[in-house]
Amino acid sequence: MTMPSRRDLLLRAPFAAAALAAASRFSAAAQGLKSGMPGPYRGRVIEVHHPGCIINGAYQAQPVQTMMRKGMMELTGAPSWTEAWRALFQKGDVVAIKVSPVGGPKLCSDALVLHYILDGLKEAGVGPRDVIVFNRYRQEFLACGMDKWVPSGVRWDAASPAYSENQLDMDGYDADHFMEMALVVPGRDPNDAHCRRSYVAKVITRQVNKIINLPVLKHHQSAGVTIALKNLSHGLVNNVNRSHISPTNNACGVFIPSVVSLPVIRNKAVLHICDAVKASWHGGPGARPQYVWEHKTMYFATDPVALDKTGWKAIDAQRAARGMAPIALSKPDKDSHFLNCQVEHIEIAGSLGLGEFDDGKIQVKRFELA
């Protein structure tokens, strides 16, 4: 390899100094950005599509890496991958990554995406022991093999051992942080505060100061869609089945934003990366093969409301292409039993200041990679 001459180094020096100065200015400005929801980039959604990101059902490393880099740099306006992560994270942060295994191995957060997030946090100075990959149910996490994705040194945890109809267990939950609502499972005592409350996981309240939300783009028969907001509301607290007890006893519209607006969640969730390489347009939240499609897209936001509004439109577009009614107008069928899919949870979340619902104030920047 030919070594550069002294003259070459002198010529390059001003450009290197300028780049370093620009990065330093960006880092200094980034430190003043407000975290939490809707975060520093209210109404901004970055949509990145790559036709080669999945082949024969398998995520492809190089395209996914390119999507992640493009998404994070465009979201933050950073000049590099490292500075993009430093805009939102720094040494000393303890970060939970909320994955989404509900759809099972065929429609869950992917290992490649998780690894690039871990790489980004490392670039920002967050040590491996300061990262906790988290899901509410341990059994779901293990069923998707997510424990095998977590590198040595990085922690993973769950709040409950497995799904249960009871959902009033408290071992993994914090009695000091809860959302109370006049809504109980039939047969339980409505005067018992414990039955009217959903308590936040201790991992979230006691161990971390920031959350990265990693949802999947999916239809949901009671909530309409399950993207950023619902991955938090039903993935971080207990006693959630009271929100959608039956096809006609459904309160997801108000339950979801009520949980997400809890300060201990609202102030800690600083980044939402929606893995929509694969997605579902009906029959959710599970992965019915006939309703799963390769969207080959990833979405990036600090604003979960704007992200969910964008994802909702993407699902409706796929439904329209399949000759199905929009989610908000859909009626029960053999694969979706609820009378009304309550996508209004997104608008109510906007009313609570969690993000931007107004299309006129949402800026979606779309990028087509090759």
Image (cartoon, rainbow, N blue to C red):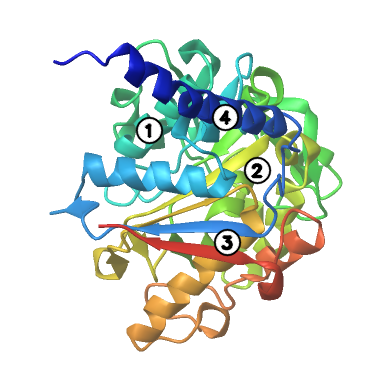
Mark 1 against mark 3, which lies toward the viewer?
Answer: 1
Q: Is 169 placed left or right of 101 in the picture?
A: right
Q: Which residue lies under the disc numbered 3?
A: 308
Q: Could you tell me how far apart the alpha carbons at marks 4 and 2 are, in whole angstroms?
A: 46 Å
Mark 3 against mark 4, which lies toward the viewer?
Answer: 4
Q: Considering the image in quadrants, where does the C terminus appear?
A: bottom left
Judge by depth and name the residue closer to the eye, 62 or 151: 62
SS class, disc 2? loop
Which mark identifies residue 239? 2
Residue visible at 56% across and 52% down in the picture: 228
Which mark identifies residue 195? none
Name which of mark 4 and mark 2 comes first in the sequence: 4
Mark 4 against mark 1, which lies toward the viewer?
Answer: 4
Q: Height in image: 232 above or below 344? A: above
Q: Height in image: 67 above or below 114? A: below
Label 3 Cα crowd, 10 Å radius (few <14 / some 14-19 / many 20+)? many
User: Residue furthest toward the right?
Assistant: 191
Residue visible at 13% across and 15% down in the picture: 1
Q: Which residue lies under the disc numbered 4?
A: 23
SS class, disc 1? helix
Q: Which residue lies under the disc numbered 1?
A: 116
SS class, disc 3? helix
Residue 142 lies in quadrant: top left
Residue visible at 55% across and 39% down in the picture: 78
